[in-house]
Image (cartoon, grey):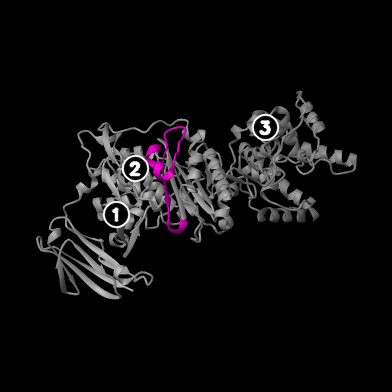
Amino acid sequence: MILSVLVSTTLVELQNDELSLDVVNQANQKTIYLDNNGNPLVHSYMGQWNSMPIPLVEFPSFLIEALLFSEDKNFYSHGGIDWKAKIRATFNNLFRLGLYQGGSTISEQAVRTLIKKRKTVWNRWIQMWQATILEGKYTKDEILSFYINQVPFASHRRGFVEAAHLYFNRSIETLSKTEMLALATIVKSPSRLDIRKGNRIEKSINRLASRMKIKVPPLGKVTTSKGSVRKLVNPLPFIDLVKGNKIDNLKFLKTTMNIKIQSLSEAILKSTLEKLKTKGASHGALMVVDHQKGDVLAVVSHNGSKNGYGYNTTLIPRQPGSTLKPFLYTLAFEKGSNPGDLIDDSPLESNISGGLHQITNYSRNYYGKLTLREALGNSLNIPAVKLVREVGEENFFEKLVDSGISLSKDVNFYGEGLALGNMEVSLTDMVSSWTCVVNRGVCKDLRFYEDQLVEQDKRVFQRFAADMTLDILSDSNAREKEFGSTSFSHQVGFKTGTSTDYRDSWAFVFNSKYLIGVWIGNLDGSPMDEVTGAKGALRVGSTLIEKKLLNEFTGKFKLDPILVRRSICVPRENGCEEKEELAKVGDLPKPIGKTVSNKWKITPMSDVLHLAVDPRIPRDLQIIKFRAEGEGALSTTWFLNDAKLETTDELAFKLRKGKFELKAINELTGKNKNIEIFIH
């Protein structure tokens, strides 16, 4: 009767638990992200299972031998229960009047790892029979592989690979035989035999070695690790961008991240922000790209107290300031200009986003006649606005869009402000677009992981034009007027940007292989205390580009074969300054003022103007000048609210409150232009 009840109860109990080693695989469906060398970006030990099990054949054979000697010498010969070991353990426990041995097999321990239950006689009885069921479903190697990868150790570690890092701070294949014996011993009672707490287990090691009939040296001093998470870098911003691309449901995903470059980038950006804290700079973002391949090597998002809110600062749109000027100059070079051509840096008014603005350079200095090399190298605003008039706002707008800059409004909204970066763009988009320049005119789609489907390379700028721009941006002499002396250990180019009221500090720093994009500012848009692109973001980029990892295998920038260096004369106050300058074979130097398009147009170039009367300035001095340029400029007739004014190429309009409609008609060609003016 008792036996019948025991059997029936046991059978019922056995049906309640599902024995499946597949639960581990199901629990590990979460993608494990690896760096470009195959190392995990972050490894958490707080999960239920070891998320990165390795095949049984990759474990040292000596470790497997030691484990079997220690835990289950007859593993490959029994059917889940080792009756001889059970009987021997029972007699030893009776003789010693205690519970010193259990005689459990590895299969039984695998069951306990799979199904957590209290340590009672009844549960041990059930688990014993469950071990036989497990052996009927899986091979010996499958059970042993599960056990050696998932058996629990201290500090939430599972499996011998994680235990090797925990107790010896090394990978398992580097352990000595003594250290492997230690692991095979510790697994019996991880809490009691934790060598991190100073517990010595030499006797246990020697007993196991004696059973194996080998001799090993003493364990000696060990260096252990601490904590529940082994964190190499902060991969979350990078992974965020990976997830933004279409990926398959993979167990492991090898990314393009370079751990060493990522770590350096994090440290340098953090250190710089700490120094700029007194200047009101709180947040920053950084990306490093191999611009020849398009591989993203590092992504850093430093958000200070806002880190916990999931912001990825590389995706936040901000005003890029002057960092788009290289795109403008490259377009001008495509259209026939040369770095040695002259442009006039003198006071200028411009229509930007429907308003009339006085354009000034950052330093408030005006330099007069300059070469385009000097104008771009010193990031001067006035020449940039004049240049966008030369190449055409529409042409520049289209070139920015082709380069990947997302512009939500039409060209008339931005106007000439395109040259000064009056839109909002994220760092990720900016870095992607900058590859079009630094990769000699060819845009590279950013790649975040292996086998990522990317767009085919697209040539946006002609190679000679991009090479001219790169030559200027890497010329330390070209930027002396505004930036002073700047030098690097190898050929490096850079471009900085600063938005209105010092809200954004930008820098793009590059050599022949790598591109670094940096943004510094505040996520709430508050201004900083005169933190320019040069004083903020450039510090980060220039420090990083000088690290050995980023300059060891780089060379000088190449030049298109159709480019030559020739001697030119640059007019100065004291006469002519001779310089060597780039140009296409056969081109002659020419002043920018002589290359104005013959197309008739009205400046400011806008269909709508919103202006305001300034009460601090006498009314007679508040004047807007409208100019006609191109064919038939002198034959332009002006009308205000349908009333004819005069026929001339320039009209001075005094500001007064109200709504007005200004019309210009080209009497020679019949073309006309209407402008709505709102004055408040």
Q: Nearer the viewer, residue 620 or 667?
A: 620
Kind of residue at disc 1: Phe
Is-magenta flag for residue 438?
Answer: no
Q: Nearer the viewer, residue 232 or 132?
A: 232
Quarter that holds the N terminus: bottom right
| Mark 3 or mark 2, earlier in chain | 3
Highlighted range, magenta: 474-503
Give the structural element (helix, strand or loop) at label 2: helix
Residue occupying the point 63% across, 34% down: 171
Q: Position of residue 501 (x, y in %)?
A: 45, 59
Residue occupying the point 55% across, 43% down: 268
| Mark 1 or mark 2, earlier in chain | 2
Task: Kindly identify which residue carries mark 3.
Answer: 64
Crowding near pointer 1: few (<14 within 10 Å), some, many (20+)? Answer: many
Task: Kindly identify which residue carries mark 1.
Answer: 397
Kind of residue at disc 3: Ile
Q: CA distance from mark 1 to mark 2?
A: 24 Å
Q: Nearer the viewer, residue 187 or 11?
A: 187
Give the structural element (helix, strand or loop) at label 1: helix
Task: Kindly identify which residue carries mark 2.
Answer: 374
